[in-house]
Amino acid sequence: MQAKKPEGTEDLFGARMRAWERMQAVARETFSRYCFSAIETPAMEQVDVFVHGIGTSTDVVRKEMFRVFSGANFANVLEKGSEAGLKPGKRLALRPEGTAGFVRAAVENTFVPQGGAPVKMWYAGPMFRGERVQKGRLRQFHQIGAEVLGASDPALDAEVIVMLMDFYRALGLDMSRVRLLVNSMGDPACRPAYRGKIRRFILDHADEMCDECAVRADTNPLRAFDCKNDRCREVMAAAPKIADELCDECADHYARVKAYLDEAGVAYEEDPTLVRGLDYYTRTVFEVQVTSGMGSQSAIGGGGRYDGLMELEGGKPTPGIGFAVGFERIMLALEDQGVDLAGPEPSCVYVACAAPECRDAVFSACLALRRAGVRVEADYQGRSLKSQFKQADKHNARLCVVIGPDELAAGAVTVRDMASHEQEQVPMDGLVEAVRNLV
């Protein structure tokens, strides 16, 4: 039986791979202006990293997280019917998001020593969730994220959001078809009372809402705002709003974030029902959506402040904020807007071999050009010269360097322009300079 990729995954190659590489390059270019450096964390972490950070009541932890066992540990789990006997270091999961792993790395490597300056880092890579597969929602998907630890200044919240919008603009999105939603989720001083109000509201309307939201009333009532059930969303639209319940400090922080966004000229909409999907968020939360072309899957990124997450992961109290954007979602938006992020295949120089006795000279020419930094392709199957010219076109070659018996005897090569079909003969030892002058 032919092997097939797992459901909910895709192979990245060709134009799709170029688009992913281009998106990372745009992120690097954009984020570097804000003094972010790159980090790569493991694709798998101890389960507790995500349980502590994301929360046991979230769908991500309860339903979607892929667990990882070695063969021996899996056999042990099957035999005992539980993983309870495994040490924490052997209870592993594929990362469903990037923030918890970044914060674990920050704690383990002391990114922010006592009194140290804030640390800014960004990452890109695959994430894994066992969700129902649909357009724009895969089981292995790709994200680019940025995180800051060590400062609670509302100006930082605004700068992170401005940077995110700069990133979308640099990718080529039509910003008139993009909207930014913002909200504040309060903090441990004011959110518990608000959670209590929402719990009572859900219980009072339990007969109008889904069973999942009835469970959320006791586990995490704010998640009811994020329910995908249309009737639940209608009911929750009438629920008490967090903006009316914020303590003075949270209200002031939120007002200053909005003032900084106004100063930066960044348009936004306040959405009092925006809660994001993970438990670690506090105060500022935000989400970016496209207004057309993606149906119900309109979100292309978002994030927020997580001032208590370092403590949950075993570190000292350290404020943080970050965001993540989805490659697959953004690609849907770009394609809907007619933006080709991948661009054409890079051009090259094709070195054609006109006779078997010229093969060594072709190898030497390729070697010299590549060592000079030129992208080079050649024939390795003994094709005819006509077939090699066709192959050069397929490789988007700007020039074709032809080496045949006549060229070999003259110590020269023929350089052919693939667009104009003009050609000239140049000495073999002048090939690199000639090619540099033409490409």
Image: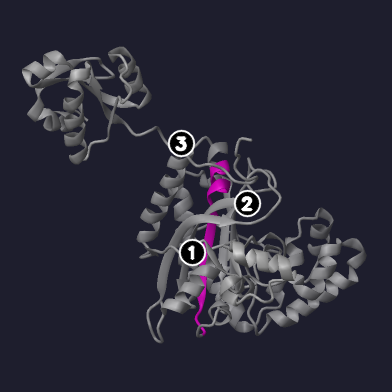
Q: Position of residue 312 (x, y in %)?
A: 58, 80
Q: Pick whichever of labels 1 and 3 is earlier in the sequence.
A: 3
Residue 21 appears left or right of 436: right
Q: Is residue 155 visible?
A: no
Magenta span covers which residues?
317-333
Count residues near mark 2 (Cα–Cα under 10 Å), then give few for <14, some for 14-19, many for 20+.
many
Count residues near mark 1 (Cα–Cα under 10 Å), then give few for <14, some for 14-19, many for 20+.
few
Using the image, determine if residue 4 lies above or below residue 289. Answer: above
* Secondary-structure class at tag 1: loop
Q: Can residue 123 be seen in this view?
A: yes
Q: Where is residue 201 in the image (x, y as percent from the top left)?
A: 84, 72
Does 197 appear in magenta? no
Residue 42 image label:
1
Q: Name the residue under label 2.
A: 139
State yes or no: discs 2 and 1 in contact (Cβ < 8 Å): no
Residue 301 image label:
none
The quadrant holding residue 345 is top left
* Residue situated in front as seen by the camera: 43 or 283: 43
Using the image, determine if residue 386 lies above or below residue 432. Answer: above
* Residue situated in front as seen by the camera: 157 or 144: 144
Residue drawn at x 77%, y 74% is: 219
Q: Which amino acid does label 2 sit on?
A: Arg
Q: Which amino acid does label 3 sit on?
A: Ala
Using the image, determine if residue 151 lies above or below residue 408. Answer: below
Q: Which amino acid does label 1 sit on?
A: Pro
Q: Mark 3 points at which residue?
A: 15
* Residue situated in front as seen by the camera: 151 or 412: 412
Separation of marks 2 and 3 at Cα, in angstroms: 21 Å
Q: Position of residue 297 (x, y in %)?
A: 66, 48
Residue 63 appears left or right of 367: right
